[in-house]
Image (cartoon, rainbow, N blue to C red):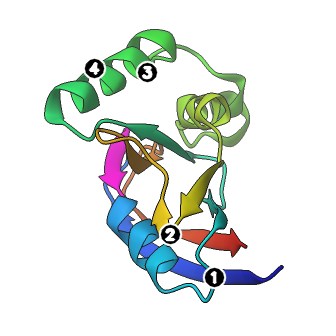
Amino acid sequence: MAVVTRECEIETRGFSDVHDITPMVTNFVKKLPFSEGAVTIFVPGSTAGVTTIEFESGVIEDLKGAFERLIPPTIEYRHDQRWGDGNGFSHIRSAICKASLTVPFVANRPATGTWQQIVLIDFDNRKRHRRFILQAIG
């Protein structure tokens, strides 16, 4: 068994900004010295998340709308009372979405579905320089 780790970076706008990172994951997996295993995508921090969706404008807007309805930024959060940074909603959204995702790969390709992309969502209330870690085991 072998482990390979790589760090990646992207610029985000916050407020449920969705980024398709599938090409970065695919490129990483394609260059691995082993052809089968699992890749974990992990975003350090407590105001972003990683998941899969169909990366299509309608689905992206539906997802953003769902987060707005379920975890609105306009209600009172104790985090905001304590820290005054106004991003309590982003912490809750991140906790629900999760900070990592593991995807199997076969023949040096992620085993995602035809319309399934890997996305990083920045929930914070400001733009950020985000880094995420790819770690493959095979």
Q: Nearer the viewer, mark 4 or mark 1?
A: 1
Q: Position of residue 131 (x, y in %)?
A: 53, 71
Q: Are marks 4 and 2 in contact (CB under 8 Å)?
A: no
Q: Quarter of the image for the C terminus: give it.
A: bottom right
In magenta, the rendered stretch is 15-21
Q: Which residue is mark 3?
A: 67
Q: Secondary structure at mark 2?
A: loop
Task: Give the mark nearest the N terminus, 4 or 1.
Answer: 1
Graded by Cα atoms within 10 Å as few (under 14), some (14 to 19) or many (20 or more), the crowding at tag 3 reads many
Q: Are marks 4 and 1 in contact (CB under 8 Å)?
A: no
> 129 and 20: which one is in front?
20
Q: Which residue is mark 4?
A: 62
Which residue does the image show at 64% across and 21% down from the upper left? 77
Of all residues, the one furthest to the right in this rendering is 1
Task: Give the mark nearest the N terminus, 3 or 4.
Answer: 4
Q: Which mark is residue 34?
A: 1
Q: CA distance from mark 4 to mark 1?
A: 37 Å
Count of numbered marks? 4
Q: Position of residue 4 (x, y in %)?
A: 69, 83
Which residue does the image show at 63% across and 28% down from the upper left? 96
The kind of residue tagged 1 is: Phe
Q: CA distance from mark 3 to mark 1?
A: 38 Å
* Image quarter of residue 91: top right
Q: Which residue is mark 2?
A: 107
